[in-house]
Image (cartoon, helix red, strand yellow):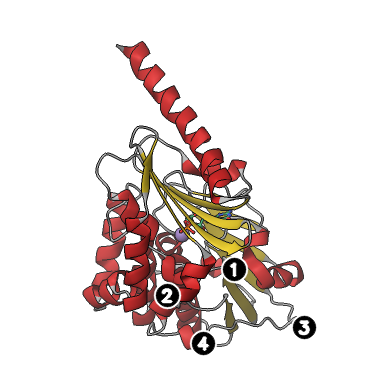
C-alpha cells in the first residue's frame, strides 16, 4: 500500500498518465486521481496525459482537461503512472517519466514488473480505479473523483460481472455511490451505448465469427477495409470480444482487427481455464489472466493458428489434470 500524502509531500508539479489506447479504467483512474489532487492539493499544478479519448467517454467530466501532446520541457516533481503494465505502453508520456524527480506506479496488470520508484501493483484488484480508491482519504473524495473511479471499476469488471469483481470491489462501488453519483447513467452512456456504425460492425463480426477447437474457442476478425466502410475507429471495436465470448459453450474468444497490412491487434478473453495473459506475453503483449492483448504479424490465418495452438495446449493440460484426478 502506498501513502498518497507522503508521495505528495513537498510536490509542486504532478503528472498523471495511463496506457496507450486508453480504456475506461485508464481514463477513470487518471481523472479520479486528478480531481482528488486538484481538490485537496490546490497549490499543486497537476496535468493528465493520455492518448486521444475514445468517443464513448466524450461526455465524462474532465476529459476536456486531458492533454494529448506532451510538453517535453516539463520535469514534474512526481509522475503517477496508472493502469499501465510497462514503460512502452505509456506512449509519448513515457518521455516525462524519465524526467520526473519521483515516480509512482499504481496498477493491476499481472505483467507489471514495477518500473516506478514506488510501486503499488495488485494483480487481484478489479481495476486501477479500485486501487486508487484505497490510497485516498474517503472523506476527502470529491464528486468527480467518485464518478471517474466508479466508471473505471464498471469498465474493468464488465459492470461487476467478471471474476475480478470481489466483495471489496462492491464495497468500494457502494462507497462511491454514496457520494451521490448517477451510476446508471455512467454505466449506460459509457459502457452499453453504441453508435449505429458500432452496432453494424459488431453485427458483421458476429456474422463472420467461427468456432474452433471443438467449439471451445470463438474467433472473429475485422479488416481495415471493413473499418473504413463502416466509418469506425479501433476504439469503436471495444466490447466486441466480450460479446463474442458470451457464446454458450466457449472457453475463450479471440478478436483481431487489422492495424496495417499483415499486422493485427489481438484481443483475447477467457472464462475459466485459459490464461490469456500468458499467451499475450508470449507474443510480446500482456494483460490479465482473463483479458489480454498483443500485436501480431502475418495473415489472419497465421495469427489465429499461432494463438489457438497455445490455447489448445492449455485446454489439453487441464483435461489431463482432470483425468489424473478421476
Ligand atoms: P484489450 O483486449 O481490451 O485491448 O486489452 C485487454 C487487457 O490487455 C487490457 O488490460 C490491456 O491493457 C492489455 N493489453 C492489450 N493489448 C496489450 C499489449 O499489446 N501489451 C500489453 N502489455 N498489454 C496489452
Ligand atoms: Mn485496468
Asked whether mark 4 and ligand 2 are closer than 8 Å, the reply comes as: no
Q: Residue at x 47, y 48 (%)?
A: 288
In screen coordinates, is 30 left or right of 200? right
As drawn, 154 above or below 186: above
Specify which label sits upstream in the sequence, 4 or 1: 4
Specify which label sits upstream in the sequence, 4 or 3: 4
* Residue pointed to by mark 3: 73
Element type where label 4 sits in the image: helix
In screen coordinates, is 9 left or right of 157? right
Tell me how far mark 2 sits from mark 4, CA to CA.
30 Å
As drawn, 231 above or below 248: below
Quick check: can you spot residue 98?
yes
Q: Residue at x 39, y 55 (%)?
A: 241
Element type where label 1 sits in the image: strand
* Residue pointed to by mark 2: 230
* Residue pointed to by mark 1: 80
Foreground disc of the pair 2, 1: 2
Asked if the residue under mark 1 is in contact with the one under mark 2, i.e. CB atoms within 8 Å, the reply is no
Asked if the residue under mark 1 is in contact with the one under mark 3, i.e. CB atoms within 8 Å, the reply is no
The residue carrying pointer 2 sits among few (fewer than 14), some (14 to 19) or many (20 or more) residues within 10 Å by Cα, namely some
Specify which label sits upstream in the sequence, 2 or 1: 1
Tell me, for residue 321, which label it has, or none. Answer: none
Tell me how far mark 3 sits from mark 1, CA to CA.
18 Å
Report x, y in % for residue 316.
43, 24
The residue carrying pointer 4 sits among few (fewer than 14), some (14 to 19) or many (20 or more) residues within 10 Å by Cα, namely few
Tell me how far mark 2 sits from mark 1, CA to CA.
37 Å
Q: Quadrant of residue 84?
A: bottom right
Tell me how far mark 4 sits from mark 3, CA to CA.
19 Å
Q: Residue at x 59, y 68 (%)?
A: 80
* Residue pointed to by mark 4: 65
Tell me how far mark 3 sits from mark 2, CA to CA.
40 Å
Amino acid at each position: 500500500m502506498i501513502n498518497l500524502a507522503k508521495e505528495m509531500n513537498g510536490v509542486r508539479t504532478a503528472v498523471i498518465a495511463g496506457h496507450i489506447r486508453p480504456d475506461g479504467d485508464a481514463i477513470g483512474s487518471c481523472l479520479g486521481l486528478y480531481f482528488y489532487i486538484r481538490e485537496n492539493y490546490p497549490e499543486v499544478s497537476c496535468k493528465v496525459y493520455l492518448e486521444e479519448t475514445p468517443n464513448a467517454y466524450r461526455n465524462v467530466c474532465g476529459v476536456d482537461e486531458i492533454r494529448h501532446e506532451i510538453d517535453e520541457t516539463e520535469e514534474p516533481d512526481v509522475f503517477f503512472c496508472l493502469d499501465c503494465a510497462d514503460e512502452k505502453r505509456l506512449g509519448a508520456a513515457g518521455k516525462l517519466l524519465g524526467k520526473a524527480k519521483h515516480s509512482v506506479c499504481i496498477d493491476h496488470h499481472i505483467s507489471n514488473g514495477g518500473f516506478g520508484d514506488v510501486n503499488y501493483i495488485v494483480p487481484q484488484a478489479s481495476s486501477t480505479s479500485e486501487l486508487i480508491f484505497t490510497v485516498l482519504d474517503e472523506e476527502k473524495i470529491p464528486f468527480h473523483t467518485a464518478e471517474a473511479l466508479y466508471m473505471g471499476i464498471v469498465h474493468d469488471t464488465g459492470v461487476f460481472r467478471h471474476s475480478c469483481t470481489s466483495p471489496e470491489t462492491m464495497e468500494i462501488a457502494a462507497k462511491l455511490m454514496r457520494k451521490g453519483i448517477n451510476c446508471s447513467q455512467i454505466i449506460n452512456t459509457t459502457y452499453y451505448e453504441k453508435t449505429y456504425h458500432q452496432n453494424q460492425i459488431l453485427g458483421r463480426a458476429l456474422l463472420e465469427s467461427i468456432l474452433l477447437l471443438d467449439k471451445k474457442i470463438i474467433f472473429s476478425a475485422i479488416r481495415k477495409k471493413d473499418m473504413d466502410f463502416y466509418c469506425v475507429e479501433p476504439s469503436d471495436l471495444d466490447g466486441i470480444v466480450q460479446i463474442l465470448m458470451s457464446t454458450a459453450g466457449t472457453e475463450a474468444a479471440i478478436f483481431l482487427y487489422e492495424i496495417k497490412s499483415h499486422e493485427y491487434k489481438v484481443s483475447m478473453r477467457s472464462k475459466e481455464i485459459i490464461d490469456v495473459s500468458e499467451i499475450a506475453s508470449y507474443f510480446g503483449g500482456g494483460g490479465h489472466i482473463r483479458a489480454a492483448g498483443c500485436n501480431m504479424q502475418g495473415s489472419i490465418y497465421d495469427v489465429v493458428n499461432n494463438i489457438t495452438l497455445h490455447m489448445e495446449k492449455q485446454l489439453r493440460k487441464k483435461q489431463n489434470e482432470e483425468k489424473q484426478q478421476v
